[in-house]
Amino acid sequence: MSRRGGVSRREVLKRAGVAGTAILALPDLGRVLPGTTDVVAQTRTLTAEAFATLHAVCARLIPTDENGPGATEAHAAEYIDRALSGALAAGRNNYKQGLAAIDRAAQQTFGAGFAKLAPPQQDAVLRALQETPFFTLVRGHTLQGTFCDPIYGGNANFVGWDLIGYPGVRLSVSAAEQNLSTPPAPTHTSAYDSGMFEKIRIDDDQS
């Protein structure tokens, strides 16, 4: 959420314990989604309306700002939508009800769906709901989608790892890197590109 009157991105990451680490892997979430300028066209599980709400929620939880890209660039909403057809399938109903509740709150308070509100209005809606179980659920999944290994469909172009300074899996570390005199250069490769990890079978028709 935004800094003014809300929770800053830094605070969100600190509370989630990912300020210096990354979520590397979660089971059975599927393949990387291609980049797109039409996010609704890529929905797999949610309706277009529900996905638009989810996309807007993720964008406010980890916003794009002067510090760099956020959940939008990382494709966190796409990650969640796809995972709801796989490892997170048990949460489909929670998302259906939770996203509908967010839209109702937006309509009741500001007279429009959540995705159509201005960012300060969106923050106000989320702030009113931040103690609910669904807010906790979607925040956790947004963090996953922003910082997971890109093979699972989030962290597009490694923007999440770059944001927190995580260089990726390293098979060797130089002396300069060990004494922290030289920051490690990002590898921008999936953990599954290394032979030490078992490859995930990725099929176009995988659920």
Image (cartoon, rainbow, N blue to C red):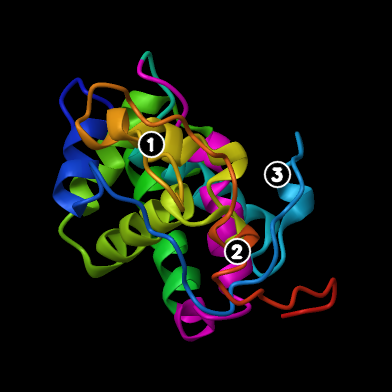
Quarter of the image holding residue 99?
A: bottom left
Instruction: Tell me the number on the disc at residue 60.
Output: 1
Mark 3: amino acid: Val
Q: Secondary structure at mark 3?
A: loop
Q: Secondary structure at mark 2?
A: helix
Magenta-colored span: 67-93
* Residue that mark 3 sits on: 39
Among numbered discs 1 and 3, the one appearing first in the sequence: 3
Q: Residue shown at 47%/72% (left/top)?
A: 26
Q: Residue shown at 28%/27% (left/top)?
A: 2
Residue 1 visible in the displayed image = no
Among numbered discs 2 and 3, the one appearing first in the sequence: 3
Residue 120 visible in the displayed image = yes
- Can you give x and y, in whole percent of width and height, for residue 67 in the image? 35, 18
Quarter of the image holding residue 19?
A: top left
Give the vertical position of 169 relative to 68 (above or below): below
Between 60 and 161, which is closer to the camera in this rendering?
Answer: 161
Q: Secondary structure at mark 1?
A: helix
Label 1, label 3: how many angstroms apart (C-alpha)? Answer: 16 Å
Q: Residue shown at 73%/78% (left/top)?
A: 201
* Residue that mark 2 sits on: 192
Q: Residue shown at 25%/62% (left/top)?
A: 136
Mark 2: amino acid: Tyr
Q: Residues within 10 Å of mark 2 (few under 14, many from 20)?
A: some
- Can you give x and y, in whole percent of width and height, for residue 7 in the image? 18, 34
Lateral position of residue 173 relative to residue 83, left or right: left
Marks 3 and 1: in contact by CB < 8 Å? no
Give the vertical position of 92 relative to 67 (above or below): below
Please tell me whether the stretch drawn in magenta is mainly helix, strand or loop. helix
Quadrant occupied by the C terminus: bottom right
Mark nearest the camera among 2 and 3 is: 2
